[in-house]
């Protein structure tokens, strides 16, 4: 049985829970209270020396980093729909995984953190930088999704799951998506995927 060390409000943890639900993979949840420093306890540091969540314990290996966990889940429990094996398609998916980990992380993800947990922000107190990062990320994702159903391929992949939490919860950071019809339509398509779960489920 897989064990997910996670925090319910963490968007990185949510993306892992979302893919687990979409794939119908059974697992147990182990809550980690970051405010109490539980992510830096000896027990968790053995599983992830970086002291971060999520961590997915498979019983034989402890996986860290939400993007890496998504890829592992897709390979182990999904099929080529979620993570293609053909090199060119795989590269496209990886490129959008990277965009979620960088552009969205420094943009709408950071805007949400600034309101909910400012100590975790990576751009410090520079609100202007975060706002510019957010505008740039939204422009790039909107451009990609304006005439497409999904980010990387013509069907959902782990790239869509990686990007969904930051954009679906952009309003938590006062980020307005009303001028992004492509993103808004894509968010609704993700929400209709069989097995979809929300952040607080």
Image: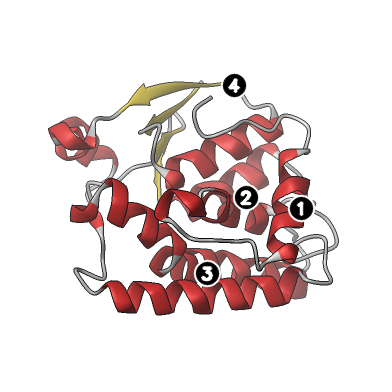
What is the secondary structure assignment of the residue under circle 2?
helix
Q: Which residue is mark 4?
A: 26
Q: Is residue 38 visible?
A: yes
Image point (66%, 55%), residue name: 160
Q: Residue 161: which disc? A: 2
Cα distance, mark 4 to mark 3? 27 Å
Q: Which residue is mark 1?
A: 156
Q: Which residue is mark 3?
A: 98
What is the secondary structure assignment of the residue under circle 3?
helix
**58 above or below 171?**
above
The crowding category of the residue bearing disc 2, from other C-alpha atoms within 10 Å (few below 14, some 14 to 19, many at least 20), is many
What is the secondary structure assignment of the residue under circle 1?
loop
The first of marks 4 and 1 along the sequence is 4
36 relative position to 62: left or right: left
**Residue 55, percent from left and from top:** 38, 39
Q: Residue 92: which disc? A: none
**Residue 132, percent from left and from top:** 41, 79
**122 above or below 157?**
below
Cα distance, mark 3 to mark 2? 12 Å
Image point (49%, 28%), residue name: 200
């Amino acid at each position: 049985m897989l064990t997910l060390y996670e925090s319910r409000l963490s968007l990185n943890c949510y993306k892992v829970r979302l893919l687990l639900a979409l794939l119908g993979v059974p697992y147990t949840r182990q809550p980690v209270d970051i405010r109490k420093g539980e992510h830096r306890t000896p027990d968790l540091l053995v599983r992830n020396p970086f002291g971060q969540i999520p961590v997915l314990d498979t019983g034989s290996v402890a996986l860290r980093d939400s993007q890496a966990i998504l890829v592992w889940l897709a390979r182990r429990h999904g099929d080529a729909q979620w993570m293609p094996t053909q090199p060119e398609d795989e590269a496209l998916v990886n490129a959008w995984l990277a965009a979620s980990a960088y552009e969205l992380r420094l943009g709408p993800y950071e805007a949400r953190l600034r309101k909910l947990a400012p100590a975790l922000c990576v751009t410090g107190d520079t609100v202007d930088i975060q706002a510019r990062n957010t505008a740039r990320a939204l422009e790039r994702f909107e451009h990609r999704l304006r005439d497409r159903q999904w980010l990387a391929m013509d069907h959902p992949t782990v790239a869509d799951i990686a990007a969904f939490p930051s954009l679906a919860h952009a309003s938590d950071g006062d980020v307005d998506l009303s001028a992004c019809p492509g993103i808004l339509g894509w968010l609704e398509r993700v929400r209709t995927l069989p097995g979809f779960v929300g952040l607080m489920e």
